[in-house]
Amino acid sequence: MSTAIALAGNPNSGKTTLFNELTGARQHVGNYPGVTVEKKQGTCVSDSGKFDIVDLPGTYSLTAYSLEEVVARDFLVNEKPSMIVNIVDASNLERNLYLSVQFMEMGIPVTIALNMMDVAKKRGIKIDIKKLSKLLNVPVVPTIARSGEGKKELLQTIASNVNGKAEPLTISYGRDIDTALDEMEEIIQSSTFLTARYRARWTAIKYLEKDQQIVESGKKEDMKVALQLEGIVKKVTGHLLATLDTHPEGIIADHRYGFINSVLKQNVIGYFQDKNRLQLSDKIDKAVTNRFLGPIIMVGILMGLYKFTFTYSEIPVGWFESFFGWIGGIADNALPEGHLKSLVISGIIDGVGGVLGFVPLIMFMFLGIAFLEDSGYLARMAFMLDRVFRMFGLHGSSVMAFIVSGGIAGGCAVPGVMATRTLKSPKERLTTLLTVPFMNCGAKLPVYALLVAAFFSKNEATVMLLITLISWVGALLVARLLRSTVIKGESTPFVMELPPYRMPTIKGILIHTWERTWQYIKKAGTVILGISIVLWAMMTFPGLPETKTQEFESLRLFIMSGVPARVLSEIETLETETIKGDNLKVTRKLSAKAMVVKKSLAQVDFDEAHAGLKNSIAGRIGSSLEGITKFAGFDWRTNIALVGGFAAKEIVVSTLGTAYSIGEVDPEETTSLSDRLKVAEGWGPLTAFSLIIFTIFYAPCFVTVVCIAKEAGSWKWAAFSVVFNTVLAFGLSVLFYQVGSIVLT
Amino acid sequence: MGRISLRQMQVDQTGTIISVKGTGELGRRIRDMGLIPGKKIKVQGRAPLHDPVSLRIMGFTLTLRNNEADHIEVEVQ
């Protein structure tokens, strides 16, 4: 038998770390307020018993004010866990207990895990745990989640208290409120109003707090009682406004903090240092968020991240490339000519290899981001950037969704879109939702990396930074446009905690990095492989008509007809020897005459493959669009790739790979795709950058589109993002390409 | 020394909250974070563009926009 436990607490209290420690589950550990939006579950098997643990979203309170709070509250009410394990940051006791008090008011058994005892000690804070436990009438266990200290004691305490009945905490809110509460409680009790779900007094408090969710469900439950309660609330509110110039919700908050204070003042907490002494974190902030130094440091950190990613990932990227080249070689030798070979090499190996080859790059990028996130620096970025974001109708917290989506190149719009759940205002949230896909997600990186390596290899870091800037400026301007047209409205509060800087744990960073990289690989492994094959089929079938094939065949015969038998046999031996590999050396041994013949034959093969691809389903789509896309510099091959990119952006790369390896004369050659593009017709820096611009802005991949539909609650916005983004991207690419062509000639 | 709005406080200045006027979402959020009458606060710093402001309360650091700070009246030392 296992016991259901809910893990709850403030953001940055070490809740996720403790969850990982208890369940061993691999979960992302962040240092930004509100990072755990989803419900995470895990099982903890210990000497004390088996526990099913749910990691509730981190919240500061239990109002219906944010989605996380509603989620946490609904879980507690609907799932009725046997116990709430409330993680309380010992170094920040007063504010953390504000949430604990609300749990206790609900009447669910609570065990407090007094976490970060080490930090509290370092700050000269001494807590009388026994006294705290006695005064609050709940078990309190000191823990240090980072090192796992106190875990055993916590589990024992949970086990021995789990079946106990909790006495709901009743706080006095002053005479006016208390009188109203008593009156309301009686009405609620006698008419069993919402009592199946909530405690009567709790419902009454929520009515006084003007809690939207409760007031709404109250109306549905029993209109008469609801009106009666609302009447009492109105009366008290009027009275309080007249006498104290304040609202009931203000008084309630005051008294909750007052209650906490009265507990702490009974020698529960002692300070052995000046409370206002500048902590190391504050000293760092003095420099890091300094008016002049702050932005410089921020840009420096972003540049450093790029340098780190590009410099150190080069070597493993090379390994991956040669590995897939080698596999391709083996497959080429082992398989007979035909569709199967083409499928394996052009569809599967090229497709997956083209994507996986960038895994090291993505891993290095995530390592850097994980460090920034876990250290607490990202929250400072939100703080410094809020003024800017607000100008565009967004929220400082939007920065997180933007960063996760690839604001620092390498995220993914799918979790990015989900990260917008932390945003409170529906309007800012929707705007963020619609603009985050412009960021440079990890799947777009291979596209950029390919083009940058091929055409801007001398200025890699600079061009990548430029790409980031373009996507940011573009996203912000589009956000402003949306906020002043289709999504108008006022902005939401920026009341946010700046968590103390913390040295990220290696374990935390590695889990974080691995999770995100794995997410990419998983996507690459499943969706992309499938689509690679579909695209291969689209590019292979229906194939050339019989008459065309014969035309190419007779062309070959014509070339060979005038050639002496000696030269022909020379070419034939070459072909048999090629199978053993070492193609280049043999080619050099050919006589001049044989070389010419071989080249013309190869040209015929190339033309045939080219004609075959052009005649394929994909080729037809690509060609039919070429008439319009030529204004942006895209030929039909690029068009095919971009159509594929709707499925997932990394497919742009694998499709280009497939497109070019099919069109290639000699499939034996293992030069990387960027080398191929360098010499390919119609390609140059101008085309490459036009494609980069298009890739930044055009329709998000279909996975993101599905998420947008879900998060926005309507397919209308999903369709909007597909159409609007593509039109915008095309307009910008054409503008760039046309202006660029004029300037360069 | 006198009552001023939180917006007008200088960096490193300390004071005691006298009243919190905000209602609805903003008011609740402010109070949940402990910005209630009687609490001591210290302005920790300002963002490079002078907005938002970061302040110290109950031993942690909180950020607030200037137009949100307008709702809070402070008795400064």
Image: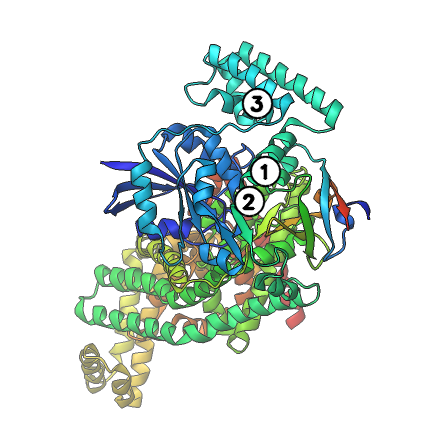
Q: Residue flagged by tag 2: what amino acid is it?
A: Glu
2 and 1 marks in contact (CB < 8 Å)? yes
Determine the chain carrying the residue at label 1: A
Residue A657 left/right relative to A382: left
Same-chain status of marks 3 and 2: yes
Sequence-wise first label, 3 or 2: 2
3D distance between C-alphas at marks 3 and 2: 25 Å
Q: Residue flagged by tag 3: what amino acid is it?
A: Tyr
Q: Is residue A532 above or below residue A37?
A: below
Q: Disc 2 designates what residue?
A: A94
Camera-side mark, 3 or 2: 2
3D distance between C-alphas at marks 1 and 3: 19 Å
Q: Disc 3 designates what residue?
A: A207
3D distance between C-alphas at marks 2 and 1: 8 Å
Q: Give the tally of numbered discs.
A: 3
Residue shown at 52% from the left, 44% from the top: A96
Same-chain status of marks 2 and 1: yes
Q: Residue flagged by tag 1: what amino acid is it?
A: Tyr
The percent coordinates of residue A626 (x first, y second) are 50, 56
The percent coordinates of residue A52 (x first, y second) are 30, 40
Front residue (pair A491, A555): A491
Q: Disc 1 designates what residue?
A: A257
Query: Mark on residue A149?
Result: none
Q: Is residue A716 above or below residue A454?
A: above
Q: Is residue A315 above or below residue A699?
A: below
> In the structure shown, which secondary structural element does the residue marked by tag 3 occupy?
helix
The percent coordinates of residue A40 (x first, y second) are 37, 44
